[in-house]
Structure formats: C-alpha cells, structure tokens
Image (cartoon, rainbow, N blue to C red):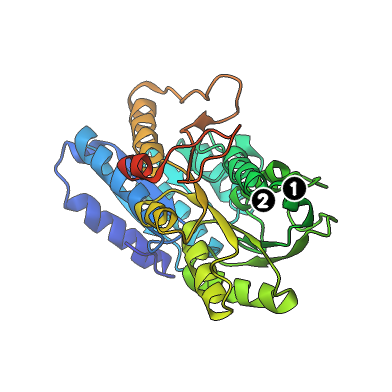
Amino acid sequence: MRITTSRTALAIAILGASAAMPAAAADIGACLITKTDINPFFVKMKEGATAKAEELGITLSTYAGKVDGDHETQVQAVETCIASGAKGILITASDTAGIVPVVQQAQDAGLLVIALDTPLEPIDSADATFATDNFKAGELIGQWAAAQLGDEAANAKIAMLDLAASQPSVGVLRDQGFLQGFGIELNDPKKWGDETDPRIVGNEVTAGNEEGGRTAMENLMQKDPEINVVYTINEPAAAGAYEALKAFGREEDVLIVSVDGGCPGVSNVADGVIGATSQQYPLLMASKGVEAIKAWAEDGVKPEPTPGLDFFNTGVSLVTDKPVDGVESIDTKEGMDRCWG
C-alpha cells in the first residue's frame, strides 16, 4: 500500500487492514516502510516480510515513499505506526539522519525499530540493522573492475552514478567501497564527491531508477565521452546507464558494475549489460526483521549484531561470468539460483 499525504487517511487504512486480519494475527502489529514500492529490491523485501508475518501470525502494514528520497512520507508512516499500536517498525530510510527524531519517538513509545539495508545515522539510532555490508559490496565491484582493466586502471575514466543528493548511508557506503576497491584514495569516507583523483569524471544522482540512470549517464558522457567505467548504485540505474551508452555507441567498450543481485540484474550480467554485481539478500533481511519484532513483542528481546560488527550481516556475493584472481565470485547460474533469497 502506498502512503497518502493525509495522516488521517493513513490511520484509517491501518485500522481497516487490522480489522481484516484474524484475531490471532491482530495481537502483534508490525510495519514495513520502504523507499518505494516500485524498485524490485523493495518488492522482494515486502514479499519476505509478508510471508514471514503470515507464518508467525503477525499483522503487517506496509508503506512506501512515492519516489526514492520521499522523506516526509516515511515520517508520516512512522507516526501512523506509533498511533496504530504496532510493536515494531522495519524501515529502509530515504533520509538516514533526518528520520532519527521520529524513530526516537517510536522507541519512546515502546516500538522496536529495525533498519533494513540502509543504516541510520548514527547506526545505533535504530535498535538493530539487518543489512548487506554495503561498503564490502562496493569494494568487491571496485576490485573486480580494477582487475579487469589491469594496468589501464591507472588511466580509467570513471562515471559515478549515485543515489540521492542527501547522501543516505547506503549510497555513501557503496560509492566509497567501490572507490577503495578500485584503488582510489578516499577523502571523507562518510560522504561521496569530495575525492580529488582525476580518474573520476563526476558524480550524478539517479534516484535508484532506470530513468535517473539514463539521464545521469547522458550528463557524464557529455562531460567526457571517453568514460570507460561506470559505477551504479543499483541495477535499475545500471540498466538506464546502458541505454544511454547505446545511444552514444559505447555499450561494448564500457565496464558497468552495480549492486543488488536481483534476478533481472543477474540476467543483465549474463547478457553482458553489467560486468559484475554484488548480490544482496533482501528477503532474508525482511524475514529476520519480522522474527525480531515477534521476539521483542513476546519476550522483550532485541536482536544481536553479527560478532565484530555493529549490524547483522545478511551477506553479499559478487556475481560475474568473468572471474578475476583474488576476488571471490559466483557465476550467473548460481546467482540466478540465489537471487533475492
């Protein structure tokens, strides 16, 4: 269900959804708030949360921003979840710092708040985070791209297709991981775009969708038509970048790398549209998040992070049919078997 701008309408929608559930399921309410309801990554996350909620007898209400970056709609959703008496919230925040005050309100009201995929800023603003190691995901595709170019990596011309100007943590981590993996010195690792390496042609934002990826790629190609490496925040942006490169006649001689590992993205790796992608597991994130809300509601127990980390690591795998020495990867056949579990 997509958020409306009316908080009253949101509250009515939740009450209606709750009334439709069996009495046993209505004992524990949970909310899933994603950035959009269009991006396949968040569609799969919703599927995972819905299936686990049905299995555990939990009433799940789902919300999404109108577009990636729609912070105000997510704030409204949190407020509605508090008012509905939910026991917990799973959220992929568009504004990872700006969402913190309303998250604190939810916690003060007794709700467990779990960040999925995208850590809040600071990360301990959420009670727990279930996510890919997004820095590692970026680092893997950076290492792969550098190895593919070999000695020519020193002369690369790199387009950086990022997520949003607000620089949510997930976008920063992937961007900075890619650059470090490629061998580019970072400046402030908590933000992108401040690097001085001349190999970086520029950064453009994509909103994580195909249209944004196409426009961003067109802008950077106009700046330097000899770009030969393209980092993309996710696979929809990568697909748009590829279409733009085709228009310039450059689709055959530019390396595109990405993060997500959805089934369409893995197919694009197999077809040569994307050279390599780092595969995430959003269904696992969401299902574990629902389990954690149930444990909190019944026993007051909060989930523990992976030892040595400040979040629960749901894993990442590099998917490519062109493996390189020193960078562990799986092929597209295995990637299709695993895509978005």
User: Are the residues at dot 1 and dot 2 in contact (C-beta closer than 8 Å)?
Assistant: yes
Above or below 256: residue 281: above
Badge 2 marks a residue whose secondary structure is helix
In this picture, residue 158 sits left or right of residue 4:
right
In this picture, residue 30 sits left or right of residue 142:
left
Density class for disc 2 (Cα within 10 Å; few <14, some 14-19, many ≥20) is: some
Q: Camera-side residue: 242 or 152?
A: 152
Q: CA distance from mark 1 to mark 2?
A: 6 Å
What kind of residue is marked 1? Asp
The residue to which callout 1 is attached is: 151
- Residue at 55 percent across and 61 percent down: it is 71
What kind of residue is marked 2? Leu
Badge 1 marks a residue whose secondary structure is helix
For the N terminus, give its image quadrant.
Answer: bottom left
In the displayed orientation, state which residue is furthest to the front. Answer: 151
In this picture, residue 297 sits left or right of residue 192:
left
The residue to which callout 2 is attached is: 149
Above or below 220: residue 85: above
**Residue 223 seen in this snapshot:** yes
Residue 22 horizontal/vertical position (percent): 14, 43
